[in-house]
């Protein structure tokens, strides 16, 4: 069992100590536990959302210390959740830093619109929903094309508040899936959506089926912002993956992917 999406207090909207997260993971039977806190965003977007650029080294040191402390019980991995395309203030040398085990690439912004921010939900009404979905998946495709990350975070986050595209997005999703498969980029099965207005895992079951058909590797994460969130919803995620045909999930060491039994 792996869990590759977990935050820390450095981002400004999570609670609990790193040790509490790791203890919760051990309690849940996790073998590989990845911290993936929000990498620094541009200054005008950053407050309460991401760590400061100068905090990145503090974060790395803290994760490495907790890895050492719990090394006999669990394998703690060091990662970042990096915003695409808003990652200009994340030092790009981290992308080739041998200490980093994995990078999650996530789309949370369309321009300056933080579309997953509950305070900015009214902007879904500004344009036809299919145009918004198309723009969102265009960004996800660019993220995949950029090939800088190991995992695509919450692949269909645009559904968070329950707005649905009227036309099928399957053709573009399949095109992106084929690229992920060719590049060896994993999709994250993220359980946090179960506790958001949409009440669904990211991505939806129909997308997970496309991923399986296209041979896209997958990993698991609870996108925890509190130790209580660690592995919340995992039974549903594992059942969904098995139902789609998956028997293995991915883990990462030094940005190299390996597979473990589901
Ligand atoms: Zn967060
Ligand atoms: Zn995210």
Image (cartoon, rainbow, N blue to C red):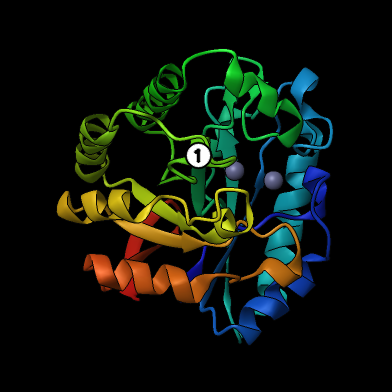
Disc 1 packing (10 Å; few <14; some 14–19; many ≥20): many
Quarter of the rendering occupied by the C terminus: bottom left
List x then y, in percent, for residue 189.
Answer: 43, 57
User: Above or below — where is 99 with respect to 90?
Assistant: below
Number of numbered discs present? 1
Q: Residue at x 45, y 25 (%)?
A: 136
Residue under label 1, please give it. Answer: 159
List x then y, in percent, for residue 105.
Answer: 49, 38
Quarter of the rendering occupied by the N terminus: bottom left
Name the quadrant containing residue 243: bottom left
Q: Taking 39 as reference, is 102 left or right?
A: left
Q: Nearer the viewer, residue 110 or 255?
A: 110
Name the quadrant containing residue 38: top right
List x then y, in percent, for residue 85.
Answer: 53, 22
Q: Residue at x 80, y 41 (%)?
A: 55
Q: Nearer the viewer, residue 10 or 238?
A: 238
User: Above or below — where is 129 with respect to 10?
Assistant: above
Q: Is any atom of residue 71 visible in this view?
A: no
Q: Residue at x 50, y 39 (%)?
A: 159
User: Above or below — where is 100 with respect to 62?
Assistant: above
Name the quadrant containing residue 23: bottom right
Q: Is any atom of residue 113 visible in this view?
A: yes
Query: CB at mark 1 closer than 8 A to ligand 2?
Result: no
Q: Secondary structure at mark 1?
A: helix
Q: Taking 19 as reference, is 242 left or right?
A: left
């Amino acid at each position: 069992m792996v869990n590759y999406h977990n935050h820390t207090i450095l981002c400004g909207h999570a609670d609990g100590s790193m040790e509490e997260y790791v203890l919760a993971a051990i309690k849940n039977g996790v073998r590989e536990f990845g911290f993936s806190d929000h990498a620094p965003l541009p200054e005008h977007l950053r407050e309460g959302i991401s760590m400061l650029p100068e905090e990145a080294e503090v974060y790395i040191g803290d994760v490495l210390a907790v890895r050492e402390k719990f090394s006999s019980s669990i394998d703690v991995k060091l990662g970042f959740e990096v915003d695409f395309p808003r990652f200009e203030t994340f030092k790009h040398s981290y992308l080739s830093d041998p200490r980093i085990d994995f990078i999650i690439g996530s789309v949370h912004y369309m321009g300056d619109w933080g579309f997953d921010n509950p305070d900015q939900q009214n902007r879904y009404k500004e344009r036809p929903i299919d145009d918004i979905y198309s723009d969102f998946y265009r960004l996800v495709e660019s993220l995949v094309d950029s090939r800088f990350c190991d995992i695509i975070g919450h692949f269909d986050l645009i559904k968070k508040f329950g707005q649905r595209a009227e036309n099928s997005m399957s053709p573009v999703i399949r095109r992106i899936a084929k690229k992920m498969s060719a590049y060896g980029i994993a999709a994250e099965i993220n359980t946090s959506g179960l506790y958001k207005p949409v009440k669904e895992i990211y991505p939806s079951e129909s997308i997970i089926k496309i991923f399986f058909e296209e041979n896209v590797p997958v990993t698991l994460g609870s996108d925890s912002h509190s130790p209580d969130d660690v592995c919340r919803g995992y039974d549903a995620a594992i059942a969904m993956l098995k139902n789609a045909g998956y028997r293995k999930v991915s883990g990462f060491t030094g940005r190299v992917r390996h597979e473990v039994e589901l």
